[in-house]
Every structure is written in C-alpha cells, then in structure tokens.
Image (cartoon, grey):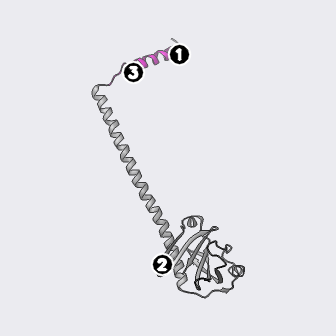
Amino acid sequence: MSDSKKTTNFKEQLNSHYLEQHLSVAQLQKLQQLKSSRKKSNSHRYIASTCALVCISILYLSFFHSHDNHISKQIAYNHSIKLQMEVLSPDYKIVQNHLSKLGFKLVSSAKIDTKEWKLIGGRYCNINGKVAAQLKVHHAKTDSEYTFYQAKLSADDIDQITDNEIYVDGVKVRLWREKGLLMGLAF
C-alpha cells in the first residue's frame, strides 16, 4: 500500500472514531458548570482589575500632588529666607548674563505681565536638586514684592507639574509649567 493511501486511511479512521464519541449527560452538565464558574471568575477578574486600576490611579495622582508639594516647600523656603539678590536690574538680559550657569535662558511668562510686574533682580537657588533662578519682582497693583522662580527640570519631573496654588508655611505658592520650564511664584 502506498504512503498516501495509508495516510488517508488513517485520517478516515481517526475522523470516524471521534465522530462516534459522545458525552454523557453528566459530562455535559459538568462542562456547563465549568463554563458558568468561568464566567463568574471572569467577572471577579474584571472587578479586581478595575479596583487595581483605581488604586494605581489614586497613587499616581497622589504622587503628582506630593511632587508638587515637595517643590512648593522648596520654593516657600527659598522665599522665606529672603536672601539678597546677586544682581539688581530690571532687565532680564542683564540678570541672565549674571546667572550664566543656569543651563537655560530666562523666559518671560504669559502669567507675569510686564506692564504690571517689574523685575528687581535675581540670584541662584536650588529647586529639586537643580540650579534655578530666583527672581524678585514687584507687582504694581498690590505694591508688593514676590519671588518668581524658573527651573529646568528633567522631562519626567516637568511632566509631573500641575498648575496649582497652595499654602506652605504661610507662603502662597503658585506652580505651573511654561516653555519647558518649571515656573513658580511665591508671596
């Protein structure tokens, strides 16, 4: 007999054998129970995965909030110790030239309107382990001095910054990101 005829014959026998097989009523009931319990198990998995996702989201958001709080505390501290400005000038270019080790260019912020806010001077400070600019600004409408911060943080750190405003040790700190920089205003 040829190999192809043996193969066909074997396939036919195998097919015939399995077509003759039947499940008993007890076996069918057991399979249906397994299917039902699997559906319940899947719904439990769905609920568990949803709960896990909610928990992860809460942790993720609280991490962002705590990250903002950490930076806000540093800004509030720098503002409270009221160190003298290293350079006094109302010109950002002059302050930039003096603070040449920043590693970034000082930028004007859309939230700090130059018609209402006047630069007094600047100095170096440290925010989140990075050299930052601490600028003293005067607000004409309130006739008050504020401290304006700019820092170049890592992409991960800057992405975690949310626009917010909080009080830290009696200092109001407003945080935002703009033009790739962390911006902070303390008063």
Q: CA distance from mark 3 to mark 2?
A: 76 Å
Q: Residue at x 45, y 65 (%)?
A: 62
Disc nearer the start of the sequence (1/2): 1
Task: Nearest to the eye among marks 3 and 1: give it.
Answer: 3
Task: Nearest to the eye among marks 1 and 2: give it.
Answer: 2
Query: Of the residues shown, which amino acid type is indicated by label 1?
Result: Ser
Out of 131 and 82, give the one closest to the viewer.
82
Task: Nearest to the eye among marks 3 and 2: give it.
Answer: 2
Out of 144 and 93, give the one closest to the viewer.
144
Residue 165 sits above or below residue 95 on the image: above
Which element is circle 3 on? helix
Residue at the disc numbered 3: 18
- Residue 134 in the magenta stretch? The answer is no
Out of 121 and 133, give the one closest to the viewer.
121
- Residue 20 in the magenta stretch? The answer is yes
Cβ–Cβ below 8 Å for labels 3 and 2? no
Cβ–Cβ below 8 Å for labels 3 and 1? no
Q: Which residues are magenta?
A: 3-23
Q: Residue at x 69, y 81 (%)?
A: 95
Residue 90 sits above or below residue 51 on the image: below
Out of 55 and 142, give the one closest to the viewer.
142
Badge 2 local density, few (<14 within 10 Å), some, or many (20+)? some
Q: Quadrant of residue 17?
A: top left
Q: Position of residue 69 (x, y in %)?
A: 49, 72
Query: Of the residues shown, which amino acid type is indicated by label 2?
Result: Val
- Magenta span: predominant SS is helix
Residue at the disc numbered 1: 4
Q: Position of residue 34 (x, y in %)?
A: 33, 36
